[in-house]
Amino acid sequence: MSKKTIAVIGSGAAALSLASAFPPSYEVTVITKKSVKNSNSVYAQGGIAAAYAKGDSIEAHLEDTLYAGCGHNDLAITADVLHDGKIMIQSLLESEFPFDRNEQGDVCLGREGAHSYNRIFHAGGDATGRLLVDYLLKQIDSNIELIEHETAADLLVENGRCIGVMTKDSQGQIKVRHADEVVLAAGGCGSLFLHHTNDSSVTGDGLSLAYRAGAELTDLEFTQFHPTLLVKNGVSYGLVSEAVRGEGGCLVDENGRRVMAERHPLGDLAPRDIVSRVIHEEMAKGNRVYIDCSAISDFEARFPTITAICEKAGVDIQSGKIPVAPGMHFLMGGVSVSCWGETTVPGLYAIGETACTGLHGANRLASNSLLEALVFGKRAAEHIMQKPVYNRQYQSSSETSVIYKVPNTEVYELQSRMTNHMSILREQGSLIELSNWLHMLPFQEMNVKDITIPQLELSHLWQAAKLMTSSALLREESRGAHFRTDFPQADVRWQGRQIVHTKKGTKIRKNEGIWKNESFTAEKVAESLFS
Ligand code: SIN
């Protein structure tokens, strides 16, 4: 019997969690744009959250996740992921994954924003993602093919089913890779904004490929801006983990005033969207914001990655003050998936940041993303293994019919406009201005044979920008990371810790337009906007 074939696009923690779950009887190909070490997972400093400390519970972790997510989370998925995630952490502990431990050998659990217990597992101080990727790469069976420097250009869809992926290698050669199942694990869209924490190869490809294939996307307006990127003289050098504030660091202005004082009961460890808005407000008033880390005695040992970032930026850690500003970090929305990672297109799965599972709601709780990556990678693999082998005969795919619209603009211009109109604060007039600009941009149509990788990335980014802006216009409320200054009052969290669970979602599908699901009044926007 022939082996079942699986093509995985991306090489972060979700992709590798999935790939490492397959035994040798499956033919798995992992295709990645740069090297296997280029992913957002590799940059993850914080860690992996799980209820492990004495007194902590999955219920408490659930409550914190819903609170951070403004009740927009899918309750059943959230409970399930936190439960399965805890089991996966237990198995990492048993397989001697190098989580940081104290002198007594007990695992060190850190604290990050909006967590009510210390529950962040970290490794290498602030190098958890890098060590996790290294670990998963070692778990991968030797028969799994890892293809680097090859870019997924389009998904092959036949009779409504995804049957493979068309790629371009670094020499511009086109390859058609048929597969029984295709898994998108290509990250989010950080490169759409001027300051971001993502790997530069993360350019909204997963969103755009899924959209082109006819898959549904959900909640693209929920973009998380991490409050603390090291930004000096307008240049961003990288993330300063929330764990720094968990260890006693605090946000101050140039005069040492605590900027989070009286802004939220959790102070410096308030949910990320709130801290980002406060810093944004301070900066708009002309104040500079710093993390004062003078209370952390062993900073260099605890945070070696951040120490290196400070050195690169010429910031003296001994001064105790790191200049920070918010930057795009994580997309809560994404390709709509089931609890197994299936998209609405048969044969196509999405996992990791590319997917919208319902775990993160309107604002992700810190360190829940590596957890989601591990859980959904494994789940999608299990689901695929339960399916029969298809033994399909494929028609030959025509390269000439694969066309992209490449806008007549630079990535920098797109990033500047997205940063000005679609970041921490949003408002109808400003979003309409952006939307008009995006939709009226002149473009050229290019065939897959002729398009360069930068042009392909620009085309994906433009597509993602249009979908996200339309979603932001449609959501006329403030919730979590989507803050509309023209609808400022609605954030449920200000009513205390009470969770108002909602299934409201913005949905988009090619040829169907954009709509809000059943909890909203159905409202379709002209299809032409999405062609
Ligand atoms: C951080 O270390 O602050 C980021 C962790 C995360 O994004 O969950």
Image (spheres, grey):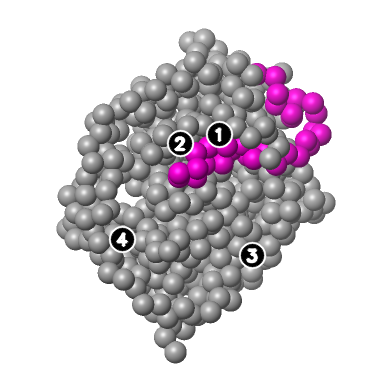
Q: Nearer the viewer, residue 390 or 489?
A: 390
Residue 527: image tag? 2
Q: Earlier in the sequence, mark 3 or mark 2?
A: 3
Q: Nearer the viewer, residue 30 or 56?
A: 30
Q: Earlier in the sequence, mark 4 or mark 1?
A: 4
Query: Mark 1: which amino acid?
Result: Lys
| Residue closest to the far bottom | 1
- Give the alpha-carbon distance from disc 2 to disc 1, as whole Å: 8 Å
Instruction: State the extent of the magenta-drawn residues as a range.
Output: 488-517
Q: Are marks 3 and 1 in contact (CB under 8 Å)?
A: no
Q: Position of residue 301 (x, y in %)?
A: 51, 46
Q: Judge depth for marks 3 and 1 and give the one in front.
A: 1
Q: Position of residue 82 (x, y in %)?
A: 70, 55
Beta carbon at label 4 within 8 Å of ligand 1: no
Q: Is residue 116 left or right of residue 343?
A: right
Q: Judge depth for marks 2 and 4 and give the one in front.
A: 2
Query: Is 512 colored magenta in this rendering?
Result: yes
Check disc 3 and report the residue beneath it. Answer: 88
Beta carbon at label 2 within 8 Å of ligand 1: no
Residue 166: image tag? 4
Q: Position of residue 393 (x, y in %)?
A: 36, 77
Question: Which secondary structure, mark 3?
Answer: helix
Check disc 1 and report the residue beneath it. Answer: 524
